[in-house]
C-alpha cells in the first residue's frame, strides 16, 4: 500500500465496526494491525488461505523426485554394480534417502517461501510513517485502506470513518 487512509482506534470494537463499515461500502483492500492476534479479523477482512502448504508440498515433491532420480542415475545407470546378483535398480534401497530429501526440501521451501509470502522482504511499508503507528505493537488498533481499491473515495470515506470516532485518522501518500 503506497496511498490510502490509516485509522487508529483505542478498542477492538471500534476497529471491528470500522471494518464492517468499509466492507459494506464495497472496499476490498484492507489491512488491520493489532497488538495481538485476533482470529475473527481474518473473516471480516476476507483473508484468503495461505499458499504455504502448497509451497511446502511442491518443495517436498521436488526433493523426493530429485533424491530418487539422483540415486537411480548414479547407482543404476552410470555406475551399476553387480553385487550378489541383485539388480542395479532396487527401489527399496532408495526409499530412506528419497523420504529424507522430501522432508529437507519441503522444509527449505517453507522456510524461504515464508519470507516471500509474508512480505518480510519489504524493507519499508508506508503505513509505518503514520504518526503513532508504533502503538500497533502495544495498545492501538489500526485499519489501513488502500487507495488502489476501485471504490476508494477519500473524502467520503474519511467522513464516514470519522463517524466511528477514531483516535487518529491520516491520509497516506
Image (spheres, helix red, strand yellow):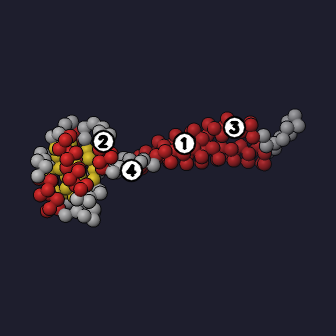
User: Alpha-carbon distance for marks 2 and 1?
Assistant: 30 Å
Q: Please name which of the two marks, 2 or 1, marks the residue nearer to the observer.
A: 2
Q: Which residue lies under the disc numbered 4?
A: 48
Query: Does residue 72 lie above or below 148 as drawn?
Result: above
Q: Which residue is mark 1?
A: 106
Asked whether residue 36 is in view, the answer is yes
In-front residue for pair 150/144: 150
Give the residue displayed 25% in from the left and 64% down from the top: 151
Residue highlighted by disc 3: 95
Residue placed under numbered mark 2 in the picture: 40
* Secondary structure at numbered mark 3: helix
Q: Is residue 63 left or right of residue 152?
A: right
SS label for mark 2: helix
Element on which disc 4 rests: loop
The answer to which quarter of the image holds residue 64 is top right
Q: Residue at x 62, y 37 (%)?
A: 100
Is tag 2's residue or tag 1's residue first in the polypeptide sequence?
2
Residue 60: image location, x then y, percent: 57, 44
**Residue 133 seen in this snapshot:** no
Mark 3 or mark 4: whose residue is earlier in sequence: 4
Amino acid at each position: 500500500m503506497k496511498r490510502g487512509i490509516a485509522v487508529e482506534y483505542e478498542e477492538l470494537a471500534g476497529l471491528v465496526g470500522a471494518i464492517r463499515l468499509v466492507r459494506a461500502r464495497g472496499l476490498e483492500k484492507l489491512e488491520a494491525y493489532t497488538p495481538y492476534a485476533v482470529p475473527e479479523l481474518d473473516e471480516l477482512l476476507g483473508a484468503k488461505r495461505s499458499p504455504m502448504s502448497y509451497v511446502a508440498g511442491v518443495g517436498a515433491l521436488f526433493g523426493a523426485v530429485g533424491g530418487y532420480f539422483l540415486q537411480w542415475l548414479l547407482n543404476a545407470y552410470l555406475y551399476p554394480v553387480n553385487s550378489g546378483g541383485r539388480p542395479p535398480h532396487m527401489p527399496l534401497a532408495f526409499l530412506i534417502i528419497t523420504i529424507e530429501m522430501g522432508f529437507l526440501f519441503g522444509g527449505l521451501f517453507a522456510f524461504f517461501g515464508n519470507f516471500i509470502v509474508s512480505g518480510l522482504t519489504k524493507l519499508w511499508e508506508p503505513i509505518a510513517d503514520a504518526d503513532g503507528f508504533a502503538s500497533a505493537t502495544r495498545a492501538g488498533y489500526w485499519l489501513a485502506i488502500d487507495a488502489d481499491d476501485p471504490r476508494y473515495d477519500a473524502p467520503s470515506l474519511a467522513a464516514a470513518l470519522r463517524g466511528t470516532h477514531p483516535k487518529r485518522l491520516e491520509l497516506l501518500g
